[in-house]
């Protein structure tokens, strides 16, 4: 299935190259980390977190496009399955 952002991912890759996308990913992750730290100390609001999440989501889409979306989807499914097993194995929470 064609991701709706493929055209823009391809254009960014052609314009700035692969190295720049990796650098951008590092920067966007760092900005989200800072926003989350500020949020915890009431120095950032929810909208700032949402904006940084959007930046990270887009660059994750870009890197996934570059490295292989199917492979990323498969890796996500493996991790979801592991998480599901972990939750099932966990002690049931005591009711009231
Ligand atoms: Mg950002």
Image (spheres, grey):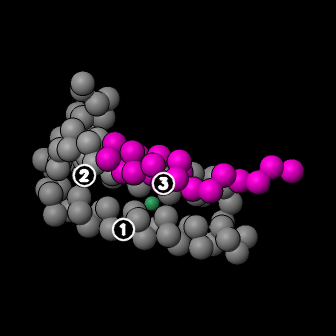
Quadrant for ligand 1 reads bottom left
Foreground label between 1 and 2: 2
Q: Earlier in the sequence, mark 1 or mark 2?
A: 1
Q: Give 9 or 80, whichever is nearer the viewer.
A: 80
Q: Is residue 47 left or right of residue 9?
A: right
Q: Residue at 30% across / 62% down in the picture? A: 24
Mark 1 in CB contact with mark 2 (< 8 angstroms):
no
Which residue is most to the right? 96
* Residue 75 in picture, x, y percent from top left: 28, 48
- Near mark 2 (Cα within 10 A), the count class, few <14, some 14-19 or many ≥20, is some
Q: Is residue 19 left or right of residue 1?
A: left
Q: Give 74 or 18, whichever is nearer the viewer.
A: 74
The magenta region covers 77-96
Q: Give 10 or 76, whichever is nearer the viewer.
A: 76
For label 3, the SS is: helix
Q: Residue at 73% across / 70% down in the picture? A: 42
Mark 3 in CB contact with mark 2 (< 8 angstroms):
no
Beta carbon at label 1 within 8 Å of ligand 1:
yes
Foreground label between 3 and 2: 3
What is the CA distance from the residue labelled 1 to the residue labelled 2? Answer: 13 Å
Residue labelled with disc 2: 63
Q: Report whether residue 67 is seen.
A: yes
Q: Earlier in the sequence, mark 1 or mark 3?
A: 1
Mark 1 in CB contact with mark 3 (< 8 angstroms):
no
Residue labelled with disc 3: 86
């Amino acid at each position: 299935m064609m991701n709706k952002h493929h055209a823009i991912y391809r254009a960014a890759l052609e314009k700035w190259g692969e190295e720049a996308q990796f650098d951008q990913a590092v920067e966007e992750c760092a900005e989200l980390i800072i926003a989350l730290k500020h949020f915890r100390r009431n120095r950032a609001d929810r909208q700032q977190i949402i904006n940084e999440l959007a930046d990270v989501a887009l660059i994750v889409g870009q890197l996934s496009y570059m490295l292989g979306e199917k492979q990323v989807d498969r890796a996500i499914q493996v991790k979801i399955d592991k998480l599901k097993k972990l939750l099932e194995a966990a002690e049931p929470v005591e009711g009231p």
